[in-house]
Structures are given as structure tokens and as C-alpha cells.
Image: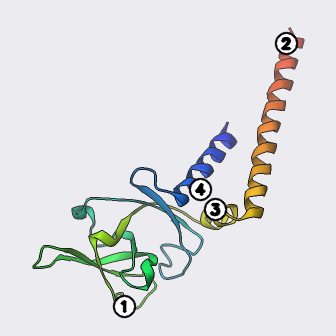
Amino acid sequence: MALGLGLIGLAALLLLTLRPIGSLRAYVILSASMRPSLQPGALVVTKRLPTEGYREGDMVTFRLPTQGGTIVTHRIVRRYVTTDGIFMVRTKGDANPGEDSWTITSDNIIGRSVLVLPWLGYLLIFLRTRPGFVMGAITFFVVFVWREVRYLVRTVNERGAV
């Protein structure tokens, strides 16, 4: 039962990396800029919040206003509203010596980190490759068949023992 739930959970996380489910989305951490809080290979699940829901100290995932919309996860170190009423945040990677050079608007924020799963990101990256997909499908099939065979053997033994 636990193995089946684990496989379902892994499939759900893989799906979250491909497309959002509601306000949830998952991303794999690729750099060391957030060490020690986030290690490379961690899977971060984010949740979109209303603008006023983001606070200093929150780890947020956002699109850079430059560099073609690169996705980054850093911590909010300062938040403010401009005279034009635009909500802005300044961010910093925990391992970086200073604040980031960019300023992020609420439109660029994807969400606040609500769950961190160390190392799982590497597995999900692998499962998105052709060999990883084949290996994952074979593993799923073997586990499914093994569970069914176990169930059938147990059923036959119980009926035969009566």
C-alpha cells in the first residue's frame, strides 16, 4: 500500500513539474545560491499567493525580468509599494553575499515555497528523459505485476486453507 501511494505521489510531483495544478507548481533547484536552505537537486513546490501574502523572509520562485524569464528561487529581503502602487520585492540567495541586482514585481512572482523535497529533483529530471521514462514505466509495471501476483497467491492460500 505504501509503495503504491509513493508511486502515486511521485507521479503527482512529476506532473507538477510539467504543469501547474491549481496554484501549485514544482521546480528543481539547480544552483547552490540558496545553500544551506536549499541544496541543488531539491524539488521545491510553490503556491501562488495574493500580492499581500508575500513577506520578508519568504522563499519565492520568480521569473527574472531580464535574461529571457529565467526562473529563480531566492528569499525576499525587502518588500515595498512604489508611489505608483506597484508591489515590488528585493531578493537574495542565502549563499550570496548581497542582494540581487534586480527588483521583482508581483507579476513576476510564481509563488512562495510551501514544500521542499531534498534530492527528488534529480530523480524527476531523470524521469523526464527517454531512458528515465522507460525505466520508470518498467519499474511501475514490475511493481504493479508483483503486487497483483502477491494478492493472487495470498487469495489462493487463504481459500485453500479453509
Determine the residue positioned at 50% across, 72% down. Answer: 38
User: Quick one: SS at disc 3?
Assistant: helix
Question: Circle 2: is it few (<14), some (14-19), or many (20+) Cα within 10 Å?
Answer: few
Q: Indicate whether 87 appears above or below 17.
A: below
User: Quick one: SS at disc 2?
Assistant: helix
Determine the residue positioned at 53% across, 81% down. Answer: 32
Question: In this view, which residue lies farthest toward the front?
Answer: 68
Sooner in the amino-acid sequence: mark 3 or mark 1: 1
Q: Which mark is residue 159?
A: 2
Sooner in the amino-acid sequence: mark 1 or mark 4: 4
The answer to whether mark 4 and mark 3 are in CB contact below 8 A is: yes
Question: In this view, which residue lies farthest toward the top?
Answer: 162
Q: Position of residue 61 (x, y in %)?
A: 41, 70
Residue that numbered label 1 is attached to: 98
Residue that numbered label 4 is attached to: 14
The answer to whether mark 2 and mark 4 are in CB contact below 8 A is: no
